[in-house]
Image (cartoon, grey):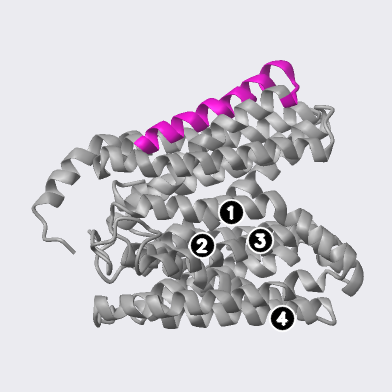
Amino acid sequence: MSQQSFAPGVESIWQGPLRPVTIGSILAVTIVAFQGLAQATVAPILADDIGGKDLYGWIFSAYIIPQIIGTVLGGIEVDRRSPAVVFGTFLAIFAAGCILAGAAPSIGWFFAGRALQGFGGGGLFAAVYAVITLAYHDRLRPAMRAATSSAWIIPSLIGPAIAGFIAETFSWRWVFFALIPVLMAVAPMTLPAYHKMHAARGELEIKAGTRARLAQAVVLALSTAAFLAGLELEPWYLALPVCAAGLVGLATMLRRLMPPGFFTAKPMLAGSIAIRALCFGAFLVAETYMVFSLKEFGGVSATTAGLALTAGSLSWSAGSLLQAPWDRWTGSEGRPIRVLVGVGSMIIGVGIMFGVLLTTRDLTLGVAIPAWVVAGLGIGLAYPTSSTIALAHAARGEEGRVSSSTLLGDLFSGAVALVNSNVLLAFGLNAGWGNPRAATLAMTLSIVLLALSLTATLRMVKSAPAIAQTAVTEPAA
């Protein structure tokens, strides 16, 4: 298991050689988060300007599909090359994507820019996650995970407003161009320190199967594209086989790309990644249909419904910040219990909204905000802690692979959960159930995912003492 770092005497993520690594990594995450959140704001404007309204959904899919390949390739390369080379390369690709998307004369060129952004963003995230394992001692990783989780908060609060202001005052193109100076500032902060990590780690043996893993990622991306394209096909007898082929490809490739035991949530490495993925999928579904319920039959405007989202983002950040001192208090032995508390809080928060929807066919802001605060606090505890557990169990030379697997779990669970919840909503509406009952049916999926997460977490808590005892007899990585 990975317990050491290239700065063993440092006691804070903000001290010594870790300071530039921390700041640069947080800025990189913030930039990628900002462009994702800003894209939803400017998409209608750019679609009017350069065309593509009939391909509106692919403005987002053009990013996600190449992100899968970038995530896996970044994980492969950071296990065999200097993190500075990997991070710098993907940073340059992401910057090129920003320039191309901003300068795009047509929707086709814009899709090409988005594809470069997705490919670069996936590799950036994989490199940053691996660096957390390489640069930071195990006792400091919870604090760094809290910092990177919090890097999503400011973009989620002000990103859409800033993007809207830039697009309306200047042009939507400057939403992409404005990121370039920040990207240029990230490079000198991170690359020298990232290179030192490689020197401290030493040369690693190139593991077999890396080409096969990259090929599997390409097939996974193509399967995702087929599945998404199938959803838009008509009539249904054409859509069904395309979607089915995509799902088969997704399941097959994920089984090969993810750690053994992922689909059965085997403790600890595979189980912690599975728990994180289940929590993420459940959170996205609950968030989507909380907003849907508030707007469609809760008598709340879109702006007011955003208050619940803001409250959840802040409580997620609070949970992430809380888990770091909690880790210092309990040590690594207390991490499975912390995940259990987080999952339990999510069940309480989402369960309150689900119960109110089920019994009253209504959801008010007075119920949604406190319930979502509890759920946000829960995922703030469970999400980074499960990542810390996974990275702590990464073998030497496998940091990148574990990092990319963690990110792939999020991509898979989020996409599949949202698609299936949309299917449930459409089924309810087509059956004539009305918005309240259809939304309740869709949110049922969140409850199911949380129940699976709870089962996996209880199994991890039960197995943790025996696994920890075994680890004591193993040499340090």
Quarter of the picture holding the C terminus: bottom left
Nearer to us of marks 1 and 2 is 2
Residue 361 highlighted magenta (yes or no): yes
Residue 152 has which mark?
1
Tag 4 and tag 3, C-beta contact below 8 Å: no
Q: Is residue 237 left or right of residue 117?
A: right
Residue drawn at 48 percent across, 60 percent down: 407
Magenta stretch: give its range.
338-365
- As shown in the figure, which amino acid type bears the numbered disc 4? Ile
Residue 450 image point, x, y percent: 49, 35
Q: Main secondary structure of the magenta part?
A: helix
- As shown in the figure, which amino acid type bears the numbered disc 2? Ile
Give the labeled residue for mark 3.
34
**In the structure shown, which secondary structural element does the residue marked by tag 3 occupy?**
helix
Closer to the camera, 126 or 92? 92
Q: Earlier in the sequence, mark 4 or mark 3?
A: 3
Residue drawn at 58 percent across, 54 percent down: 152
**Residues packed near mark 4 inside 10 Å, few (<14), some (14 to 19) or many (20 plus):** many
Residue drawn at 36 percent across, 78 percent down: 210
Residue 456 highlighted magenta (yes or no): no
Q: Earlier in the sequence, mark 1 or mark 2?
A: 2
Give the labeled residue for mark 2.
26
